[in-house]
Image (tube, rainbow, N blue to C red):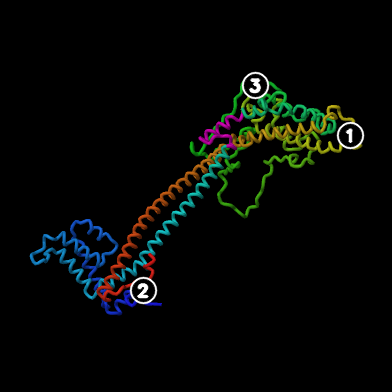
Amino acid sequence: MTFDDNTIDIHLTKLVDWLVDRRHCSKDWNERSVAIRAKIQQAILDMPEHDEIKRLLGSSYLDYFCCLKIVEILKETEKESKNMFGMYSSQRMKDWRTIVSNYEKNSVYLVESAQILQRNVAFEIPALRKHINKCQQIRDECHTRHAELEKNIHEIEKQYTQLCHDMSIKGENVQKELIQRIEYLPNICTELVNGETSLIGLLKPTVEFYIEFMKHFHSTTKSDNEEYLPILKYLIQYGNTTVYQWKTGGHAPVSIERPALNYKFAEAAEIDETEPNIILGLDDDDNLATTIEGIEVKQTAEQSDVIDFDIEPEIDWSAIDTVPELLDPALTSNGTHPNSIPDALREAATNGATHPTDDGIARGNDALTLLENRQTYTLFIHELHRIQSFLKQRLNEYHVNETILMTFIMQNAPSSVQKINENDLKTFLKNIDSIFTSVAQRQIDRLFSMRDSYKFVDRLVNSFQQKKVAVERNRLQQKELEEKAANSLKEEQEIKEKLNLLISYTKQLKEQVAKEISVKKCQNRRINIMGEINTL
């Protein structure tokens, strides 16, 4: 291995110590450098207008070599102040020449330049690169978060579209469209019974089969004045007429006075919490006063707000009308009493049938159609469930109808019952299931809740608005992220330009320092500054 004796290798981290230890620079170079920096700060306050001087003053650091360039520029700008002896009378030239002279004394400029190289390589350049990486990380996070928000927006819009589809509205003006849906409820109920695609008419053989079967096998469960499936039979025969006409045995009313639908929404008017929430389709009771919670507490003048715990509480049960027959069928005294809640509803719905309105005007709940009225609609659904359960049971029994027992049981049945086969039962059951599907598709139960409670509609409107607000909020966050990413990209580009300038300046300063040490301190021997500076 051969060594070049003309080359001096100096590691950048040891360059300052190398210059001081070999007495190329004095040990008090730092104090001298501070004094020179102060003079530079004073000198730059009075500078001529020159583009190159502006560029030098705008650089990150004014070192010795920059001062030499400024002196060369001043020789051109201050040439008018040059006397016959070649001296300059300009104060600017005197100040900068003094600065250069102080730098060259004891080679302060060499050790200061070496320190600049160390600081740039160890701190300034890594800090800028770290800042660039931080900007890239911020931009990547913004893009990731933007994609997540876009996914959230897509999901919320999908939910909004599904909610609009469930409510059968477009979603452009939710409140108005929901009210239109409520107002269209009578037409929906009529279409369910009297429409072209109505299946109610197909239930006639099913109802006849059910009635014949029940009369033959369960004749003792009904009294003579009671009938089976009254709502279905009436709907098949007369259609979806008013409750008044059903109660009066088919007599059409002279005129119909439908109950008014007054809706209040949080956006349109302030909700009065003390106003009772009237439910259409239920009979009014003048003796019952209800608040929004369903209970009205009244305090007399003799009552006090203070609770006396020493007084034994007494409960007055006289005001409570208990109907144990509705809770336990075993408590009924005979077969004529209602033994189920639907029977009680039927009795309440038909109450007044023997006392029709004298003027022939259908008012209030009686002006509603059978499927609009909550009570009669409940009876309608109950009868559908009853006949559905009946058909399922008959299908299960049909598979054992060839046994001796079933043959003996069915031989005395009417011919209309005996001729029904398994395919007929499946067809009947299919029609019932289709009606339930049609009711579910028309969302009649939800429309009842919307019609009977403006607060329910208000909650639906709020659910739509919350999804819209969530989309707008996510859109706003996306816009902020886009601005943040754009600012980060702009900042990254500016820092990259600054980094490139700093790397170029550092490499140039390294060459200048190596040349100065070689020429002035080491008799033109080649100076090789090693270290991380060579990997920039």
Gap between marks 3 and 1 measured at Cα: 47 Å
Quarter occupied by residue 380: top right
Q: Nearer the viewer, mark 1 or mark 2?
A: 2
**Res. 131 in view:** yes
Mark sitting earlier along the chain (2/3): 2
Q: Amino acid at mark 1?
A: Ile
Is residue 175 magenta-colored? yes
Q: Taking 230 as reference, is 18 above or below it?
A: below
Between 276 and 392, the one nearer to me in the picture: 392
The span shown in magenta is 165-186
Residue on which disc 3 sits: 253
Residue on which disc 2 sits: 11
Q: Is residue 340 left or right of residue 419?
A: left
Q: Taking 481 as reference, is 433 above or below it?
A: above
Neighbour tally class for label 3: few under 14, some 14-19, many 20 plus, Cα within 10 Å: some
Is residue 329 magenta-colored? no
At which x and y percent is residue 152? 52, 47
Say the numbered circle drawn on residue 23. none
Q: Helix or strand or loop: what does disc 1 sit on?
A: helix
Mark sitting earlier along the chain (3/1): 3
Gap between marks 2 and 3 measured at Cα: 111 Å
Q: Helix or strand or loop: what does disc 2 sit on?
A: strand
Residue on which disc 1 sits: 409
Q: Taking 492 as reference, is 293 above or below it?
A: above
